[in-house]
Amino acid sequence: MKASPSLRSETKKGIEIASTPPCQAFHAALVHDDLANRTFSWLAPSHRLDILSWIQSAEQEYDRFMRVQEALDILAGR
């Protein structure tokens, strides 16, 4: 079975970004937001990696949560 493009792990310098907890939270949130999920799947891999890196770079848990929410809103056009 082929993985959905939105759920594939992206790598940056050999680090599996999608396996980290903030990115797992983002992917879990994507499952529940169809429009954001479709938009994310249409993005170029480098743009997907940028979003995942931006979420992961937040130092505090609250900031990561807010970035996940903001990314979903941007992807869904809200």
Image (cartoon, grey):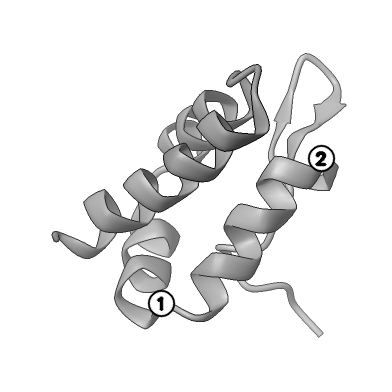
**Which of 12/51 is in front?**
51
Q: Could you classify mark 2 by the number of other residues whose Cα lies within 10 Å: few (under 14), some (14-19), or many (20 or more)?
A: few
In the image, what residue occupies the spot 42% across and 70% down?
Answer: 37
**Distance of mark 2 from mark 1, alpha carbons?**
20 Å
Answer with left or right where residue 78 lies relative to residue 71.
left
- Residue 20, disc: 2
**Which of 7/24 is in front?**
24
Q: Using the rendered view, name the quadrant where residue 19 is placed.
A: top right
In the image, what residue occupies the spot 46% across and 35% down?
Answer: 51
Q: Which residue is mark 1?
A: 33
| Quarter in which the C terminus is drawn | bottom left
Q: Residue furthest left?
A: 78
Q: Give how far across and how far down residue 23 sits, in percent.
A: 68, 46
| Mark 2 or mark 1: whose residue is earlier in sequence | 2
Q: At numbered mark 1, what does the secondary structure look like: helix, strand or loop?
A: loop
Answer with left or right where residue 15 lies relative to residue 2.
right
- Residue 52, disc: none
Q: Using the rendered view, name the quadrant where residue 26 is placed.
A: bottom right
Q: Give how far across and how far down residue 22 sits, in percent.
A: 69, 42
